[in-house]
Image (cartoon, rainbow, N blue to C red):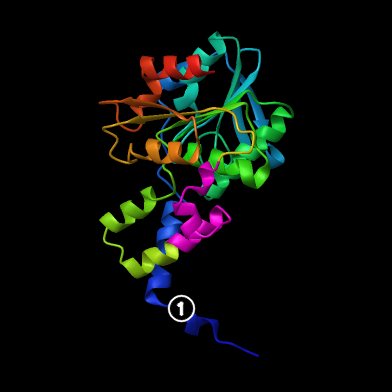
Amino acid sequence: MNMDLHARTTPALDLAAELMHGMSHPAALALRPQDAALLEGAERFRFGPGGALQGWGLGDGPVVCLVHGYGGLGVQMAPLARAIAARGYRALFFDAEGHGASAPGPVGFDSFITASAALSDHVGGPVHAWVGHSAGGLAMMRARALHGVAGGRYVVISAPLFPYVPLERMRELGAPAAALEHVKMGLAEQFRTGWSRLAAGISFAKEDEGGPLLAIYDRDDTRVDHGDAERIAGLWPGCRIVKTEGLGHNRILQDAGVIEAVTGFL
C-alpha cells in the first residue's frame, strides 16, 4: 500500500530533527598551546574502523582507559592520564569521532559508546579501569551492556544519570514539549532502550560481578546535578562518592584533589 510519508511530518517532528542535527554537530573545542604541551611524549595511535580515531598512550602497566566528554577533547584527560601513568599504569585516552584529531562525523551518545567499544577492542585484553567524564562517562557505562566493555573498576566524573543535559539546554532555548518528546525517543535509540528505563539509570546498572565504582561530582556544576552521585549509588551498592566545590563541570578534571582521589582508587 502506498503511503504519503510527508503526511506524517509534523512541526514538532521537524523541529526535533533540527534539534538532534544541531546536537550532533557541536562547536569545536580548540587545542590551546598549553594543551599541546600535555601531549608531548605520549605515544600516538589510531584505532577504530579504518583508524578513524586518534588515541594517545602514556606509561606501562595495567591499562586504564579514559573517555572525554561531549564537545571536548582527549587532551582534557591528559593531566589525569599522566598522574595515572606515574602510578604504574598504562593510560589511554582519545578524541571521539567528530572531535579533535579524529575523523569528522556526527556526534551522539552512540558515537561515544561505539568509541569506548573500539578502544576496548584495540586493547584486546583486560582493562584495569575505565574513567569517563560527563557524557563520555555515561556512554562508557552503557557500553558495558551493549558491547561487553568491562573493567576491574570504574570512575565517573560529572556524568549525568541519563542524557537530560541536552534536553535542558533545548528547553532553555524555548523548544516546546512536543518536540522534546521526539528528542527523547531519539536519545533513547542511541542507548538502545526506552526512555523510561534510560531515565531510571539503566546505564549504571551494576554487573553481577561488577567491580567498585567511584563517582566524583562538583556541587557548583551548572550542567550536571551533583545529586546524580547519590542516585547512581542507589543503583550500584558500595559506590564511593567524592564531592568537590567551586570547580564546575570541566575544571574538576585538573583539580589535584580529584586526581589524587582517582589515582588512589585505582
Identify the residue at horizontal 45%, vertical 58% (top origin).
Answer: 21
Q: Where is residue 209 in the image (x, y as percent from the top left)?
A: 64, 33
> Is 38 drawn above or below residue 25 in the view shown?
above
Would residue 127 be found to the left or right of residue 254 on screen? right
Q: Which of 264 and 54 is in front in this view?
A: 264
Q: In which quarter of the image is residue 133?
A: top left
Q: Give the range drawn in magenta.
A: 184-205
Q: Residue furthest right?
A: 124
Identify the residue at horizontal 29%, vertical 26% (top origin).
Answer: 247
Quadrant that contains the C terminus: top right
Q: In which quarter of the image is residue 219?
A: top left
Q: Can residue 52 be seen in this view?
A: no
> Of helix, strand and loop, which mostly describes the magenta segment?
helix
Q: Is residue 83 visible?
A: yes
Q: Where is residue 9 in the image (x, y as percent from the top left)?
A: 46, 78
Secondary structure state at the residue bearing disc 1:
loop
- Identified by mark 1, the residue type is Thr
Quadrant that contains the N terminus: bottom right
Count how many numbered circles sit on residues in the image: 1
Q: Which of 218 and 165 is in front in this view?
A: 218
Report the residue marked by disc 1. 9
Identify the residue at horizontal 39%, vertical 50% (top origin).
Answer: 164
> Is 124 drawn above or below residue 85 in the view shown?
below
> Is 8 drawn above or below residue 1 in the view shown?
above
Residue density around tag 1, few if under 14, some if 14–19, many if 20 or more, within 10 Å: few
Q: Where is residue 225 in the image (x, y as percent from the top left)?
A: 32, 41
Whether residue 68 is in magenta: the answer is no
Q: Position of residue 15 (x, y in %)?
A: 38, 67
Identify the residue at horizontal 32%, vertical 41% (top origin).
Answer: 223
Whether residue 189 is in magenta: the answer is yes
